[in-house]
Image (cartoon, rainbow, N blue to C red):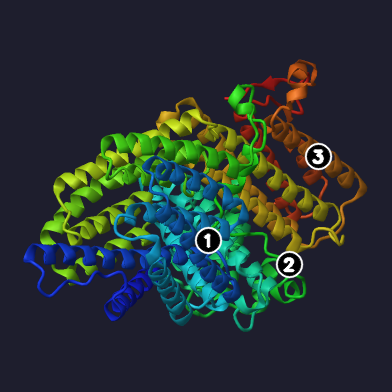
Amino acid sequence: MAVEIVLAIGVVLVAEWLFVRATGALQVPVPPQAPAAMAAQLWMLNHALLVIAMMLGAILAMIGGFGVGMFGKASAQLALLLYLPLPMLALLAVGLTVHVRVVSLALLAVVLAVGTYCRRFGPPGFTGGVLAFMGAFLGFFIQAYVSLADFGWLTAEVLIGTAGTIAVHFTLFPPRAEAAVRRMQRSYGARARALASEVAELFEATSRSGQSESTPGEERRLQRQLLRLNEAALLIDAQLNSPAAVPAGWSTAALHQRLFDAEVSLSNVARFAPALAGRSLPAPAAALIVGTLTGIRDADLAAVFDGAARIRQLIEDRCAEIGPDDCILLQRFATSVTDLGTALRAFRLYPASVPPDDAVLDNTRPNNTGPDNAGNEEFQPQVSTSGGWLPGSASIAGTASQERGGNGLIERIRLAPNARIAIQMGIAVGGAIIAGDALSGRRFYWAVIAAFITFMGANTAGEQLRKSVFRVAGTVIGVIAGAIFAHLVGNVVWLQIVVVMISLFLGLYLFRINYTFMTIGITVMVSQLYVELDEFSNSLLLLRLAETAVGAGVAILTVLLVLPLRVGRVARVAARQQLEALADLADRCLDRLADPDSAVGSDLELRAAARRMDVAYQALVAVVWPMRTPLFGSLAARVAGFMAPAVAARHYAHNLLLDASTRYADLDKRATDSLAVARHQLAESVGAVTAALAPTPAATADDAADQPARQYIRSASLFERVADALPGQPLVSRPHLALRDLQLLDGALAEAARWADVPVTDLDCTPPQARSGG
């Protein structure tokens, strides 16, 4: 995206320059006998008009470059690019017509509020609203140079920007679904190798130091790598809705299955290896684990499969010496390693080694549905994207905005998310105009843009506050960098263009890491623009910083006081949806355990439920990310406390899926009845937690005392009874492992319930004892 936008802007700038030179568009003729002072003044005017033409085209190229990524089909992308000039030209004409300053300033606030509300119409509404504001904004500022009579020239310059953007996009960056999937496969492979390397280093470091567990910093790094791997997997899944996206030789279901298996297996390796590092294992076991992890890190699949087989043999020979708990961990580690090798070999994420025979691989997961069978099922992606990325907190914030948030007056207000942000945007921009105009009547627009940016892509009060801070921080750094480059480059035009293009590229490319980088890039670019207009000075950059701080301050006050969508309110919705998705997956897996031959709960359906859980988890992380700071006090501590068991529960649910996907003999009646009781208890307990996280209806708020007390009743002992009734070896039997997954899942959910203020009761306690949350 960054490369495309920079190239499109470069092409459009050249095209606009050639157009103006060839036609004299908007240029004022300089009389041959004009005095030198007049000639210089006219030259500066013509130069400013040339810059205006280039800005019109460049703005459309930038917004168009952002917009095309929101569509996958070429026809939809072309329709969007052809549509974009319309709102910009319409409001440009209005901006040129209105010459009353107060009315023009009020128009900016109104256009931004209405444009923000138009987000409800999807990408066309979003990008159209932004370009409508840019049209009104530019019309207000260039009306001193251009009249409505010149609108034809302005239209031509905007259309040149459109044509240049279309030419660059469809010539160099046409939408190709299969190429996009292959790029994401390479990204997935890179993230998988980075995670494998992190796990190997962590195991060796923990083993050498003799620590019982990894440090909090190491755990955070590991979780970040796991999150990025899951993001890449979800983005690939989102693109598998078209047969054209699937590489030759694959079916959508088979590619999805291998992708899912590789991710879950590697995640398990990343969980089990650090846990084993803190155990007192015999030296041969530790050596085998190190060798297997090294094989994963070095892409030596032969070593991977050999290490897994030798670990299984070690378990059989020395299980009594190792201990049952450590044997279970080793067994799960070995199974995860084998599953990982199988998936990676098929997925071609690693160079081909000397893999074992398929018959050996099949024996590691008996009777599991393979990719050939999976290809016969109809695959439906469970992941949707926004602009080519996961939607983050947007959908969660939308749900929270329309729910009753609490007992406070403001929290009771329910609004469509677009209406809420539109109201906030109008008030914030109006306040920024007033405050910015008081500081500088000519440069007030920096305050307006700072307030405007605060609400772009930010869905909760926490995100909006962070973005305001990043805007100011980026401006401070950008002002310093801009001043340095302005003095170094001077009036050398080609160097100015190089600085602008590089700063813009870096700002766009690093935008996903932190918005501060985007602000730095834009500020450096603006500095070069003012050099070109002969208006640059250090005091001007300081004024930009002051205006930005004013605009960000107004935005912060608006976020805190005007219909705030508090992050805690959104976090409750995100946590509830995560638990609901997890409960749905567990219920489907229990269907399979109760009746392996049932048509309900196919492998593809189970993985679809798991992907819905992963999407909910990514949204939960996006919501709580701004709450990590100690500024949130006890709320940050509660969020951290809830997230730890939520992360663990998600991993246990993934393992439950793998273990419940295996065909095996039917349970006897006693085990089936016990499983039904345990299943009912788990569902009831999770329902108690989700009900506690749901909004209290206004009509029944006063009757809350009459409602039965919610509590989480543990079901682990019930699942343990079912396991005791099963035949087979507990360490290697998939049904036993599935029931162990359910016991662990119950423990994690119970801990999450405590942090949600739901009392937890152990089923075997007589009488039941409730334990309050932390």
The answer to whether the residues at label 1 and label 3 have Cβ atoms under 8 Å apart is no
User: Residue 678 has which mark?
Assistant: 3
Q: CA distance from mark 1 to mark 2?
A: 41 Å
| Total number of numbered discs in the rendering | 3
Q: Position of residue 462 (x, y in %)?
A: 47, 37
Left or right: where does residue 126 sit relative to residue 324?
left
Q: CA distance from mark 2 to mark 3?
A: 26 Å
Which amino acid type is shown beneath numbered disc 1? Answer: Gly
Left or right: where does residue 144 sit relative to residue 200?
left
Q: CA distance from mark 1 to mark 3?
A: 43 Å
The answer, for residue 229, to whether it is visible in the render is yes
* Secondary element at image label 1: loop
Q: Given this view, does label 1 or label 2 mark the residue nearer the observer?
A: 1
Question: At 36% across and 60% down in the image, what residue appears?
Answer: 147
Which amino acid type is shown beneath numbered disc 2? Answer: Pro
**Front residue of 132 and 412:** 132
Q: Which residue is mark 1?
A: 387
* Secondary element at image label 2: loop
Q: Position of residue 616 (x, y in %)?
A: 62, 48
The answer to whether the residues at label 2 and label 3 have Cβ atoms under 8 Å apart is no
Classed neighbour count for the residue bearing mark 3: other residues with Cα under 10 Å, few (<14), some (14–19), many (≥20): many
